[in-house]
Amino acid sequence: MKLSKYFYVTLRETPSDATMPSHIFLMRGGYIKPVSTGIYSMMPMGFRVIQKIVNIIREEMNKIGGIEVDLPVVQTAELWSESGRYQAIGEELLRFKDRNNHNMVLAMTHEEAMTDLVRYVLNSYKQLPVMLYQFKTKYRDEARARGGLIRVREFLMKDAYSFHTSQEDLDRHYQEEYDAYLRIYRRVGIEPVVVQSDTGIMGGKVAHEFMLDTPNGEDYLILCKKCGYQANREIAKFQRVPFKGDENAALEKVATPNSESIDELTKFLNVPAESTAKCVFFDFEGKLITVVVPGNLDVSEIKLHNLLKAKELYPAEDSLIKACGMVPGFASPINSHDTRIIVDEAIADSFDLVTGANEEGFHFKHCNPKRDFPKFEVADIAEASEVCKCPCCGELLTETRGIEMGNIFKLGTKFSESMGAKFLTAEKTTAPAIMGCYGIGVGRLMASVVENSHDDFGPIWPKSIAPFQVEIVPIGKEAELVELAEKFEKELEAAGIDVLVDDRDERPGVKFKDADLWGSPVRIAIGKKGLANSEVEWKFRNEKDFSMVKVEDVVAKAKAYFAE
RNA sequence: CGGGAUGUAGCUCAGCCUGGUAGAGCGCUUGAAUGGGGUUCAAGAGGUCGCUGAUUCGAAUUCAGUCAUCCCGACCA
């Protein structure tokens, strides 16, 4: 490809609204063009990368028996009502009416449509297992799109769905998907961190997320460096270390003026945070939920969501807290009423705690929850952090941040049951198919690769997905330079290598800066000086220095490098 | 949905406080010199200052509303 005939743009300056490296370089290199919040056009440079990622994923899906299909984005509300998700999902699902006034949605995922397809065909256990997948646009009306392609509203996703006759067969295939995912990420140069994750609106029990470990990540990950326990912080478990002082000491009210926060309280009383019981309040369907966790930990709202099976959960207003007999800032379940009390496991086994007295400016010392609290439930409700111990081996946990590049779920029969994707077993009984689903956001993966691999000048693409694998840069416009560039272009393309020739009448500096933004693994500069010795300059994008290569060796060297 | 900020040339921004003929750099067009990390010179093209309304003799500038975009938080298969 000759650059003079291509459709491209590069930006000299960083767009004012971009902060993440992937966003900056995808904009500056002319890979993407914003159209609206979280909605982007793919320009030719970006589309080339997307297509290469798609091909890698397709190869790996086919390897494990996947069969490609293509389902619609525009779907009826009726279909989503069958699974219950038309009602269960909030504003993230974009709803609208067609000209006949029918309620419609833009699909944010395809479990319903895929289950609908399978039930149309499925009769017998002999047809299972089957795994269907597609590359399809999803629309999610995100409350807050951000970070270029990291979190968008419209995006291309590879979504796969498997259907099985038994849990064992799902387990077997789930492992195949897991392994295929590892191969996919490694082929684009990323070693993912795989964590246990929440199943959210998908339902199901087991799920894993494939994360890029990066300080720019939106998700928090809890890792054990010793035994390998890895989980999304949302659901991470940890060993409780109950605080145990004097079990029999009587409640004692102490004045704690201006000590509304745990920080102020522990300083005032000179006690450790883990010896305090912190109350956090939520409004669940109009009723007050009182959650009690150790003062050094936070409540995991996801764990609470799952425990309550809540669709919506909000922080409680002070008026609601007071109506139940508690005083914000000085609260505890002691003497409260009309509230469901959920106590973290650590608190349930602790005693001699400091907690609120439900009176402005006062706390209780020596609180023993089992003795002093009204009836309460015990649950794993606190959020894991770096002060917590591994649930498996007891080692101190570490925390890092990640970008979710993909996920896999064991769905079970949530959709097949509700939508009637059933089959006749060998025993002549009817059973719903057992399902799994597996997703990869293609654009987010492209951005993740840039986050993972770039320098101050642009992306450093792996050769598997670089828009062009070789960029040829003639320095000057003498006929012999141009002719040699064309010769290289023809011969390399004949060898199946993607080549970009910068045939513009531009200064070398301009060409090199642009080449860095396009990140080809190999750059070949053809200059008069080198040509005097029949040599050209060969430079790897990920190395600082270049080497001189004889003109006659260039094509063979490139072939060898890209054959690796 | 809360909090903060920004909308002026293709891009990055100044001008606004204190109202009076629309600015710079880069990019683009033409010409010339140059030619190994965004070179230089000359001549040009390009903007109803996000939109609507109000105040005023006069609004990019003041006021009100509205739309859009970004950042932080909430939310997020």
Image: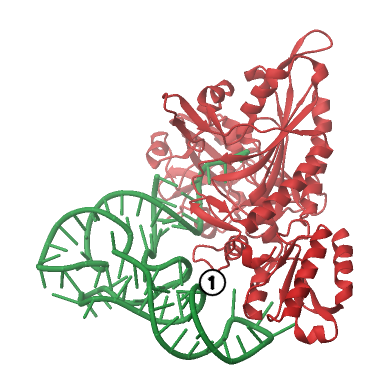
Quarter that holds the N terminus of chain A: bottom right
Count of marks placed on residues: 1
Q: Name the residue at the top extreme.
A: A428
Q: Residues within 10 Å of mark 1 (few under 14, many from 20)?
A: few
- In the rendering, at what x and y percent does residue A556 appear? 89, 67
Left/right placement of residue A548 relative to residue A42 reads right
Q: Quadrant of residue B14?
A: bottom left
Q: Nearer the viewer, residue A359 or A139?
A: A139
Quarter that holds the C terminus of chain A: bottom right
**Residue plotted at (72% across, 61% down):** A468
- In the rendering, at what x and y percent does residue A412 appear? 71, 26
Chain where mark 1 sits: A
Q: Is residue A225 visible?
A: yes
Q: Quadrant of residue A346?
A: top right
Q: Is residue A241 visible?
A: no
Left/right placement of residue A475 relative to residue A332 reads right
Q: Is residue A237 above or below residue B40?
A: above
| Callout 1 secondary element | loop
Give the color of chain B as drawn. Answer: green
Give the color of chain A as drawn. Answer: red
Q: Is residue A428 above or below residue A166?
A: above
**Residue plotted at (51% across, 35% down):** A93
Q: Amino acid at mark 1?
A: Glu
Q: Which residue is mark 1?
A: A13
- In the rendering, at what x and y percent does residue A327 appear? 42, 43
